[in-house]
Image (cartoon, helix red, strand yellow):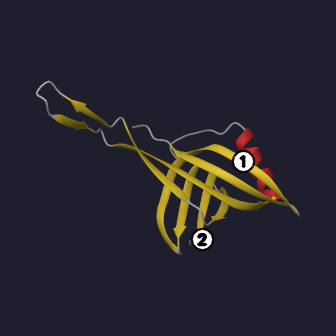
Amino acid sequence: MADEYQIDWEYTNGNSIEFKTNDLQITWNRLYMSVEARPDGNLYVVDPGVVQRTFTFSSVLTGATLNTLNTVMTGAITYDATYPRIKTIYFAGATTITNIECAMTSLTATDLGSGMWDVNVTLTEYNTA
């Protein structure tokens, strides 16, 4: 069984939603990286070093928390240099990733009954690089 991770997603100062998940997947994308064949016959790697991470996970939330998340998702979020962000990801009790500005690019919710919802979330890192 996978470890349980806790993701604290802060959408405005002091307002956050806590997700607990055991299926966190982090994808690193090297944007603008290419391998070029030049006229001299050699291959060269061009890499400006711009990395974008995508965080995908599922979690079970109460209906009240999902309502807050729905309000945030459908509202006009102001994206700036601080929010929204992954404030903290706890890996097996230890903090290893903090303060990643990201947009919630996908949210899917399935009713489990008894006021509980299974949500699938994708958070995509954004930066100005």
Image location of residue 109, percent across then percent down: 76, 50
Residue beneath the point at 14% across and 24% down: 39
Side of 23 where 46 appears, left or right: left
- Separation (CA) of disc 1 from disc 2: 20 Å
**Which residue is found at the position 28% from the left and 39% from the top?**
47
Res. 100 visible in picture: yes
> Image quadrant of residue 104?
top right
Residue linked to disc 1: 108
**Three-letter amino acid code at disc 2?**
Glu
Q: Is residue 110 left or right of residue 86?
A: right
Quadrant of the rendering where the N terminus is positioned = bottom right
Q: Point out residue 50 in the picture as x, y percentages from the top left corner.
A: 36, 41
**Outermost residue toward the left?**
40
**Residue, x 54% and y 63% (percent of image)?**
89
Identify which residue, 40 or 124, lies in the foreground. 40
Count neighbours of disc 1 (C-alpha within 10 A) and say few if under 14, some if 14 to 19, many if 20 or more. few
Q: Which mark is residue 63?
A: none
In the rendered image, which quarter contains the C terminus? Answer: top left
Q: How many neighbours does mark 2 have within 10 angstroms: few (below 14), some (14-19), or many (20 or more)?
A: some
Residue 35: x, y in percent?
Answer: 27, 35
Q: Is residue 77 above or below residue 27?
A: above
The local secondary structure at tag 2 comes to loop
- Secondary structure state at the residue bearing disc 1: strand
Please say whether residue 12 is visible from this viewpoint.
Answer: no
Q: Amino acid at mark 1?
A: Thr
Q: Name the residue nearer the viewer: 71 or 42.
A: 42
Residue, disc 2: 4
Q: Using the image as rendered, state which of residue 67 and residue 110 is in the foreground.
A: 110
